[in-house]
Image (tube, rainbow, N blue to C red):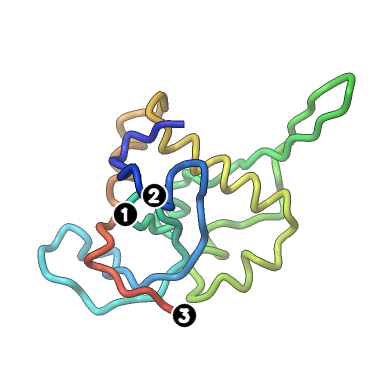
Amino acid sequence: MKSWIEVPTDSDFSLANVPFGVCSFPSSSTLSSTTLAPCTPRCCTAIGNHAIDLHLLAEAGLLDNLLMTTESDESRCSEIITNFHPRIVFSQPTLNEFMSCEKHVWVAVRNRIISLFLDSSSSSSSNNNDIQIAIQADNRLQQNS
């Protein structure tokens, strides 16, 4: 899987490994500013040398209508996950609420992130703008324990 974000060949964070963590991001109102605003811990993932603010992806609606896929020998079925609220879950300063979700939610979030960042992604240009805002170079972040 190739991402449209540059991923160094020695990176542990390609689309084959989408981790979840917490970083301190600049406040969303000043993301376009060149100065680092007071930091707010938020749920994130990493691709290459970039951290992705999951709260901003959720606020843009890019984590809505996640699909749970079940497979059997005869068929494959997908249904929308209705009991997951990404805007609430990813606005938290910890991963606790996300980790309390069932495994199929984690898989669905990971699959959506992969689809958003795949090189062949057919995201609309407005989605790409929302995605670009959520991307932060890792040298501007503080990792939280």
Tell me which residue sits at (47%, 53%) in the image: 58
- x then y, percent, for residue 123: 40, 29
Could you tell which of marks 1 and 3 lies nearer the N-terminus? Answer: 1
Query: Circle 2 sits on which residue?
Result: 47
Quarter where residue 131 is shown: top left
Q: Are marks 2 and 3 in contact (CB under 8 Å)?
A: no
The mark nearer the N terminus, 2 or 3, is 2
Which kind of residue does numbered mark 1 sit on?
His
Give how far apart the Cα atoms at labels 1 and 3 are. Answer: 18 Å
Residue 67 placement (x, y as % from top left): 67, 38
User: What residue lies at 56% left-to-right and 56% top-to-bottom?
Assistant: 86
How far across and down, in percent of the image, does residue 47 sit?
Answer: 39, 49
Say above or below: 1 vs 106: above
Tally of numbered tags? 3
Whole-percent x, y for residue 13 in the image: 43, 51
From the viewer's side, name the closer residue of 106 and 6.
Answer: 6
Of residue 116 and residue 29, the one placed in the foreground of this image is: 116
Q: Is residue 28 above or below residue 17?
A: below
What's the amino acid at mark 2? Ile
Which residue is under mark 3?
145
SS at mark 1 in the image: strand
Residue carrying label 1: 50
